[in-house]
Amino acid sequence: MISYNEALEIIRIEFNKLNVKTEQIDLLNSVNRVLAEDILSDINLPPFDNSAMDGFAIKFNQNIKEWKITGEIPAGKFNNYILNEESAISIMTGAKLPAGCDTVIPVEDVKIKNDFAYLNEGVRFAKGINTRKQGEDLLKGKLAIPINTLLKPHHIAVAASCGRSMLKVFKRLKIGVLATGDELVDIHETPAGDKIRCSNLYAIISAVRDINMHSVNFGIAKDDKQLIHDRLKWALESELDILITTGGVSFGKFDYVKEVYENLGVETKFWQVKIKPGKPVLFGTYERNDVKTMVFGLPGNPVSSLVNFFLFVQQNIMNLFKLKINNRFTATLEDDLKKEDTKRHFMRGVYSCGNDGKYYVKKMGNQSSGNLAEMGKSNCLIIIEEARMNPRKGETAECIMI
Ligand code: AMP
Ligand code: MG
């Protein structure tokens, strides 16, 4: 059995062999996609010196505190008034500064009487205030957004101001999902007798969608070797980047997934990892017509399959696209934790931010990998490394937001 870090490294090496393609898409469709080019500014930002406030454009002189108002410049309606130290132009936020103007006095700092603006008592002003210089945000030709950025609305804003209506992004990975199990019924049914609802299919597909990848639903297959064979063959021939199955991958008499994968030509890279939950996880690769597919056999326990998705699939997709991992943090334990084996544990917990600005985490009462409802109440995984035994309240642990 290999360790968690060894498993991650094996997956990382194989993921790097994926042929990630790029495409041009409309700016408005690019949110939550990964940028596949550097975006440079085609103009200076801002394009001209302008006012940062609604106020009065002046030529600064420390000793002059009243000005004759000689004109008005709304935003987008420039008029090149000539300023001297005794005059002021009423100017709006974003309007281009007239020649000679180096300072803007906010409208709320003056009193206006008979076309004169008088600085209010006690107002301090200095040369240059409330002006924005051409190119001070970004100079023409400079890097606005780097490649491998996960595009959020604030990046779209920058791309828009650089005049980019189309962006080159990485194509979304195509990820197939199949659940296996004789006991499974679909969620529209009320399970009777020894049946249960198939939650995994929905959990994994939504986890795929949550990271904005493209999911393909291969449904539920019964624990019948031929049925699983046919369904997996179909999935493997569908030119997927990643295929994920849940269930049927441990030691049960009817756990056929590993055997069928291998019969179909999947090369197993590892099976079983020293982790909890999710020990039986399988990872392999498949190649057909020059298309490489990463194959994951996740265990059927609903907690295990989802935790394994976060740990192996999601984490490696983020690495593949060189995205910053920003869902990890350190928190202080609010309980003693029981851990007496040398596996790496990922316990479900609830984190919160204390009045001291630090993170605290409480573990969920039930850590059974079948206890889905408890996972539904949690918001993080608490990582307890291999060698660490029974961590105590007050100690810290690394956590992953989920
Ligand atoms: P397995 O990995 O197939 O041995 O399944 C382990 C446990 O997970 C069993 O209790 C299954 O009933 C349960 N299980 C398997 N697949 C699913 C699924 N798609 N949705 C919910 N529970 C499942
Ligand atoms: Mg099963």
Image: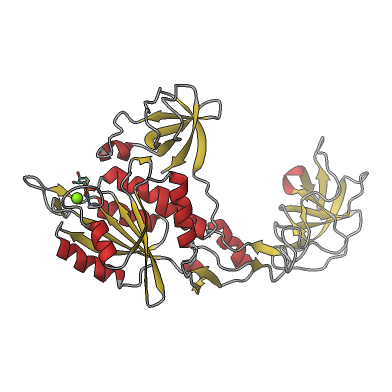
> Which quarter shows the N terminus?
top left
Task: From the viewer's perspective, tell me whether residue 251 is left or right of residue 72.
Answer: left
Residue at the image point whose x is 13% and y is 50% from the top? 183
Q: Quadrant of residue 49?
A: bottom right
Task: From the viewer's perspective, tell me whether residue 235 is left or right of residue 136.
Answer: left
Image location (x, y in percent) of residue 112: 77, 48
Task: From the viewer's perspective, tell me whether residue 209 is left or right of residue 34.
Answer: left
Image location (x, y in percent) of residue 342: 40, 34
Q: Quadrant of residue 366?
A: top left
Image location (x, y in percent) of residue 28: 49, 67
Q: Nearer the viewer, residue 252 or 219?
A: 252
Residue 359 showing in the rendered view = yes
Residue at the image point whose x is 28% and y is 39% from the top? 369
> Which quarter shows the C terminus?
top left
Q: Nearer the viewer, residue 175 or 82?
A: 175
Image location (x, y in percent) of residue 278: 32, 44
